[in-house]
Amino acid sequence: MWNSNLQTFAVGIMMAASVSLSACDSAKQAVTSDVTTEEEAPAVKPEQENSMPNVDLDGATVEQGTPVSYNVSSWSNEEVKPVSINDVDKIKPTFGKVVTTDENSLDYASNPATKYRFMDTDAPYLDLIDSEKYLELGWYYANPTDSKEEKKLSQAHAKKSYLLARRLMGDDGGKVLSDMLTGQVIKNKTTGGQKIELAKCEFYSCMLVLNKSGEKADNS
């Protein structure tokens, strides 16, 4: 009786062990299958990675361009006829023909002013803003990804502003324009007999703001 029970117990253990080993083999095969799948997955080739366009975090394609070159040293340094900051009628011809005049504009400090625009509304702008306190030069500062035509106009605007700056401040005015075009910001500085409130080129815009009180003080 005991032997029969022992035999039955032994058979039960063997069957349990067999089931356990079978389960282990199945799990091992599953793991092996997963590993094989990962190892067999095709890798991205270096040339494939390099061929993808540059994209920003939003998935948009990042454009690359050539920065605009302003060869200020090649611009004319011939003697120019000085002009008073208060004589806007003699200043305007330096920029060309006035296309539109806005007598309800505002100056740098939000004072009433007259804005003279020398370009059509759909073209890179070139403006002269005249008020009782300020004279402002403003023009489009081309971006590296702009078209050749936009860059060409931006250079032409800068060259005209360079000429006017020299007429208002002498050779020092030319230096101010050159510094602006290389990224320098000028604030509250008297140069060539004029008080520069602000001069800078950034974010698609160049602006030179002159405080008229500077010239009045020199002429008193």
Image (spheres, helix red, strand yellow):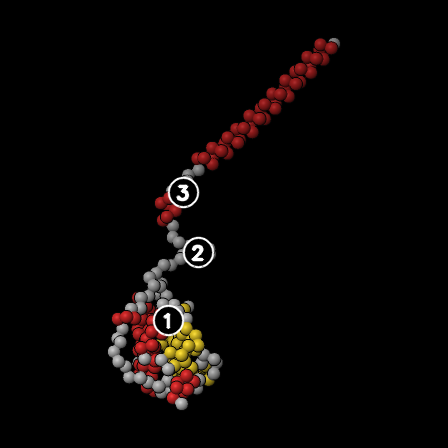
Considering only vertical position in the picture, is 34 above or below 141? above
Residue to which mark 1 is pinned? 180
Q: Nearer the viewer, residue 86 or 187?
A: 187
Q: Nearer the viewer, residue 140 or 191?
A: 191
Which quadrant of the figure has residue 7?
A: top right
Question: What amino acid is at disc 1?
Answer: Met
Q: Secondary structure at mark 3?
A: loop
Q: Residue 94: horizontal and vertical position, in percent?
A: 31, 81
- Tag shown at residue 22: none
Q: Earlier in the sequence, mark 1 or mark 3?
A: 3
Considering only vertical position in the picture, is 63 above or below 1? below
Residue to which mark 3 is pinned? 44
Q: Residue 45: horizontal and vertical position, in percent?
A: 38, 42
Residue to which mark 2 is pinned? 56
Which quadrant of the figure has residue 8?
A: top right
Residue positioned 49% across, 33% down in the render: 35
Q: Earlier in the sequence, mark 2 or mark 3?
A: 3
Q: Nearer the viewer, mark 1 or mark 3?
A: 1
Question: What amino acid is at disc 3?
Answer: Val
Q: Earlier in the sequence, mark 1 or mark 2?
A: 2
Q: Quadrant of the C terminus?
A: bottom left
Q: Residue 135: horizontal and vertical position, in percent?
A: 40, 82
Q: Secondary structure at mark 1?
A: helix
**Is the residue marked by circle 3 packed among few (<14), some (14-19), or many (20+) residues within 10 Å?**
few
Tags 1 and 3 in contact by the CB under 8 Å rule?
A: no
Considering only vertical position in the picture, is 153 above or below 170? above
Question: What amino acid is at disc 2?
Answer: Asp
